[in-house]
Image (cartoon, coloured by chain):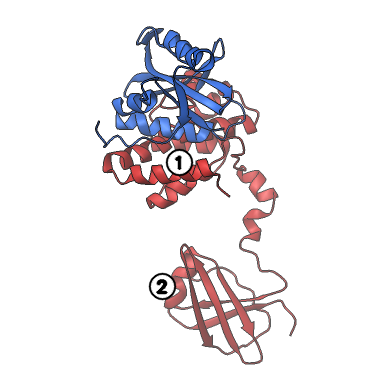
Chain colours: A blue, B red
Amino acid sequence: MRFLDYVSPAGNNLIAEWYCGISVESRAMFDALLDILSKKKEWTAPEFKHLGDGLGEIRWKCDGKQHRVIGSWQKEPSGFWLLMGCMHKQNIYSPPDAITTAAKRLKGILNENKGRVEQHEIPDCSVKG
Amino acid sequence: MKTKDELSNTKSRIARLKDKAYRDAFVASQISVGLPFQIRSLREKRNMKQADLAQKTGMLQPRISAMESPGGAKFTLETLRRVASAFDVALVVRFAPFSELLRWSERFEPDEFAVPSFEDDFASGQLESDYALTQSEAKIFIDSNVLANAFVYHRPVLSLDAGNRQISGKVETIGKIATYQTKIPILKDVVEIPKMPPASQTSLEARITYAGTR
């Protein structure tokens, strides 16, 4: 299983941007989680939850916060597409429209030729700009 | 063999490890993310429910649930000791180089991860075979301060040249192999070794077990 990052129509890797905006501890946990999920045959709770409409979220807790990355399994290019990074508190996403945004991004790539995905790599957050 | 994607991932991981803050977070992540998968895998391989593990560890089921969630629990050594005891497995806690931790994280297979309990380990013969003498080779244990550490911590593998009354061999240690050669008087073909000599012994006295053919 490989992971791919959402890249906006403007050419920005929004997953890398989200990643560099969270704490280094959360980043390392996300990296470790992807390492493990890439080798697991079946993704289950508590680290994964199906959201419906072909979406699912990777879940972990760090710094007392519930982190989520919403994505979707797709065949072309094959892998789990990472669409939207967000947080979750008391059943509310932050940002609140995280699932809708993820769905729009997916639809944009699949149906409207807006945006794309690229191979996920651990971003270098020391590079500004 | 690693795939191109895996190689690329390793490369970027190594690059990130040059940053001290990421290095520290990487160590922490192997505990907060890696351990939940290990615990869950060990529990499921034993067909245990969280409630069963809770009962065996003397903890509450929600605590087990939290321990199986990435970042869900803070682990103390006492907690881990209790979990290890419940699964009847050993627990290894030691400091290590980053290269070793990276290798471990890359080789960790959550679906395949299994550690036999002491009973299964013993029944499989693994515990004893690691230290048993084989019929096809001669092994010599020497009491000496030079080799004492090797006896205590590592398994020496020696061969016996009875004709020349020489022994040579190697001591496999982590990361290197020490070789040595010495002449000793061979007194008997077979000498039982009651137990390992204490590290403080300094006499160069051979205790020989020779089970091969001459």
Q: How many marks?
A: 2
Between A7 and B88, the residue placed more toward the observer is A7
Residue B78 sits above or below residue B145 on the image: above
Three-letter code, disc 1: Asn
Q: CA distance from mark 2 to mark 1?
A: 48 Å
The residue sitting at 75% across, 81% down in the picture is B213
Q: Nearer the viewer, mark 2 or mark 1?
A: 1
The residue sitting at 65% across, 54% down in the picture is B126
Residue B51 visible (yes or no): yes
Dot 2 or dot 1, earlier in sequence: 1
Same subunit, tags 2 and 1: yes
* 10 Å crowding of disc 2: few (<14), some (14-19), many (20+): few
Residue B208 lies left or right of residue B171; in this view the side is right
Circle 2 residue: B200
Kindly state the secondary structure of the residue where label 1 is placed: helix
Three-letter code, disc 2: Ser
Residue most extreme to the right: B213
Circle 1 residue: B9
Kindly state the secondary structure of the residue where label 2 is placed: loop
Residue most extreme to the left: A128
Residue B119, image x, y percentages: 65, 44
On residue A2, which mark appears? Answer: none
